[in-house]
Every structure is written in structure tokens, then in C-alpha cells.
Image (cartoon, rainbow, N blue to C red):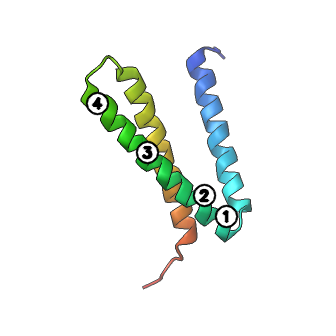
Amino acid sequence: MRRNGRTQGYVAAKHEERFENEQNFRMTEEEMRKALAMLQVEHRDLDIAISALTESGGPNLLQVARLKKRKLRLKDQIAAITDYLTPDIIA
């Protein structure tokens, strides 16, 4: 198996994601709600940062791409916690 930076980064990201998911299931509901609020604040902050960088028109395309990727990961984490906290209603 080839070990370049891209492969190692992918493996590390998957490991981090799995660890975060496992952590969420060990948290109490109150802790999960606090984590959800923090993730939502960070998501909003990233949105503001991305807008500011985009409006500046500088050569920060790589930084904008990284911030957008982080924002998407946060969105996925927010959705996972929200789904866990929201009871299933069978209609």
C-alpha cells in the first residue's frame, strides 16, 4: 500500500471521525446538547470567515477550500447529534 500524504490524511480523518462518533454515544444527553451548541457556533463562525475571505478576493482559494471542508464535517456532526437527540416518530 502506498503511503503518501493524501492516503495518510484520509486514514487520519476517518479515524478521527470514528472516534468522534464513538465519543458522542458515551456522552449524556446534556453533554450532547452542549456539544451541539458549540458545533453550531463554530459552523456559524466558519461561515463568516469564508464570506470574509471570499469578499477580500485574495489568493486564499486553498484556505477557503479547507474551511469549507471543515464546515461540511461540522454539518455532518451536527446532523448526527441532532438525529440522535430527536426521537423517531412513527406516523
Mark 1 vs mark 2, CA separation in Å: 6 Å
**Residues marked 3 and 4 touching at CB (< 8 Å):** no
Q: In this image, 69 relative to 29: left or right?
A: left
Mark 4 or mark 2: whose residue is earlier in sequence? 2
Badge 1 local density, few (<14 within 10 Å), some, or many (20+)? few
**Residues marked 1 and 2 touching at CB (< 8 Å):** yes
The answer to which quarter of the image holds residue 59 is: top left
Tag on residue 53?
none
The answer to which quarter of the image holds residue 56 is: top left
In this figure, which residue is indicated by the disc labeled 2?
35
**Residues marked 3 and 1 touching at CB (< 8 Å):** no
Mark 3 or mark 1: whose residue is earlier in sequence? 1
Location of residue 25 in the rendering, given as x and y in whole percent from the top left corner: 69, 61
Mark 3 or mark 4: whose residue is earlier in sequence? 3
Locate the N terminus by quadrant: top right
Mark 2 vs mark 3, CA separation in Å: 15 Å
Mark 4 vs mark 2, CA separation in Å: 28 Å
Residue lying at 48% horizontally and 38% vertically, measured from the top left: 70
Task: Say which amino acid is labelled 3.
Answer: Asp
Tag on residue 54?
4
In this figure, which residue is indicated by the disc labeled 3?
45
**Residues marked 4 and 1 touching at CB (< 8 Å):** no
In this figure, which residue is indicated by the disc labeled 1?
31
Task: Say which amino acid is labelled 4.
Answer: Thr
Q: Secondary structure at mark 2?
A: helix
Mark 2 or mark 3: whose residue is earlier in sequence? 2
Location of residue 28 in the rendering, given as x and y in whole percent from the top left corner: 71, 68
Q: Secondary structure at mark 1?
A: helix
Badge 4 local density, few (<14 within 10 Å), some, or many (20+)? some
Q: Secondary structure at mark 3?
A: helix
